[in-house]
Amino acid sequence: MTEQTGDRRSRRSRKLLKQGLLELLREKRFANISVRDITERMDLNRGTFYLHYPDTTALMRSVEEDILGEVRQLVDAHLQESVENGTLRPVFEPVLEYVVANRETCAALFDNNSSSYLLEQMQKLIGDYGTDLLQAFYHTEDPERYAYFLSFISYGLAGLMKEWFDRGMVLPKETLADTAEHLVTSAAQAMLG
């Protein structure tokens, strides 16, 4: 067997394990999902699971990291446009589009993430990118104010997203984007402007 064939099989196995976990998350709580559940669902050997992940938590983290990586790519692709236009909309809209396109996966992760890892990482992502945007928009050099503001905004935007999921995403995404932009802009003007 060539190394390339082995890599392809490993990628396929990891993909199937992630798919199995996501399917099961739509049916039951993460805490109630076992390695056996996942491998039986995908007709894989338990040894295949342990070849790639030490436990179900590591598999869950891998799924979350995949999503966070895709969101980071979207933000990177639109960050300069946000800076040039002085608005979060060029960043926020593609992220919302991604969430809508991956609705079932994102909803299952938000609903089943008892450790809040995904929300914490989303908040970290907002904080990481937020400093550059704040400096571009408000030209202030007060790191303490930035820290408080970014904490406020990151928890607020993550909470807004979670609430949107919890309510079945019935609010149109354009309205959600308008609301998020208004909340961020108002808070920024009050605190930094």
Image (tube, helix red, strand yellow):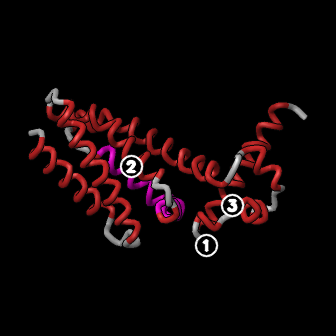
- At x 63%, y 68%, the residue is 32
In this rendering, would 84 be left or right of 99? left
Neighbour tally class for label 1: few under 14, some 14-19, many 20 plus, Cα within 10 Å = few
| Residue at the right extreme, as displayed | 1
Determine whether the residue tagged by mark 1 lies in a helix, strand or loop: loop
Disc with the residue nearer the chain's start (1 vs 2): 1
- From the image, give the main secondary structure of the stretch colored magenta: helix
Residue 54 image offset from top left, x and y in percent: 71, 47
Image mark for residue 132: none
Above or below for 4 versus 188: above
- At x 54%, y 45%, the residue is 65
Neighbour tally class for label 2: few under 14, some 14-19, many 20 plus, Cα within 10 Å = some
Image mark for residue 94: 2
Membership of 54 in magenta stretch: no
In this rendering, would 79 be left or right of 190? right
For label 3, the residue is: 20
Q: Give the range drawn in magenta.
A: 90-110
Q: Which of marks 1 and 2 is in front?
A: 1
In-front residue for pair 149/114:
114
**What residue type is disc 3 on?**
Gly
**What residue type is disc 2 on?**
Pro
The quarter holding residue 131 reads top left
Determine whether the residue tagged by mark 3 lies in a helix, strand or loop: helix
Quadrant, the C terminus: top left
Quadrant, the N terminus: top right
Residue 182 image offset from top left, x and y in percent: 18, 54
In this rendering, would 61 be left or right of 146? right
For label 1, the residue is: 27
